[in-house]
Amino acid sequence: MEDRILKPEILLVGPYPEWDMVELEKTYHVHKLYEASDTVAFFRNHGGNIRAVATRGELGAPASLIGNLPKLEVVSVYGVGYDAVDLAACREKGIRVTNTPDVLTNDVADLGIAMMLTQSRGMIGAERWVKDGSWAAKGLYPLRRRVWGRKAGVLGLGRIGFEVAKRLRGFDMDIAYSDVTEKSYADGMTYIADPVALAERSDFLFVTLSASAATRHIVSRDVIKALGAEGMLINISRASNIDEDALLDALETGVLGSAALDVFEGEPKLNPRFLALDNVLLQPHHASGTVETRKAMGQLVRNNLAAHFSNAPLLTPVV
């Protein structure tokens, strides 16, 4: 009881790394929703005392969760994406929302480039070619496609998209981008407002825009078709930005050449159709998955919580 009186009570929706858990539990009385076997009883027993939610980008804070926390004051998201947080419900109830931008930007961009290179040069299959004896038995690995000097499109030239474009310049690529408006910092890049036209121009299309109701399935069947049988789609944003059924259809029929994906609808239980394809690189939503970045993300979550409970300005407010 003394712990509850001295420490604000917070709800952890999903697990954080151990280094974050140690620090959180020093400062707060932490309730772990992911360990609750009976959520109805959990909220009945604890919901009325919880003042903050610490969550992850893919888990968010839906209206059903918010409705069980009458004293909720702030939602701190471990991740840059906050589309899984019901912002309308938060605004209505005066609940603040924060995320962790900037600290993960470069690692996400790095993985996007690594995925492009890995898929284009067939590095997963090439390693298997060596290990299973095919090199010795069959000779050279089948030829793949180059990256340097080709055309790249970046859909969403925000923080991550810009860092992707910076890296693409190192490969002497012809870079174009789409966004809601032309960007003054996009020196040397071609602005193409229409995503279909951007895809039609591109050999590689990077999806790097934030997710919202307006961007849902912005990578539509038409965009995928325009990218074409020689094109590659790389998604390091959110799964909802892509029409996944259209993507699977295109990969299965050869309408789209290949894809490299770090995010999926319903992850980690992705559509089993993906598992049967040999023209898609699948990654487990780990674009920010370095020790350095995850520590920085956790620190920013804690700093935002500390700012809220000390009545200081939030460091990275969304709402």
Image: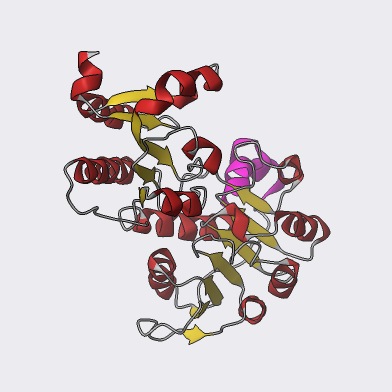
Residue at 65% of width from left, 60% of height from top?
A: 242
Q: Quadrant of the N terminus?
A: top left
Q: Is residue 268 above or below residue 283?
A: above
Residue at 20% of width from left, 46% of height from top?
A: 307
Q: Position of residue 129 (x, y in %)?
A: 64, 43
Q: Is residue 261 above or below residue 129?
A: below
Q: Position of residue 198 (x, y in %)?
A: 61, 79
Q: Quadrant of the C terminus?
A: bottom left
**Magenta stretch containing residue 218, yes or no?**
no
Taking depth in this image into account, of 164 and 174 the one nearest to the observer is 164
Q: Position of residue 182 (x, y in %)?
A: 45, 85
The image quarter in which residue 248 lies: bottom right
In the image, which residues are magenta?
Answer: 120-139
Res. 284 in view: no
Q: Magenta residues: mostly which secondary structure?
A: helix
Residue at 70% of width from left, 55% of height from top?
A: 244
Taking depth in this image into account, of 226 and 257 the one nearest to the observer is 226
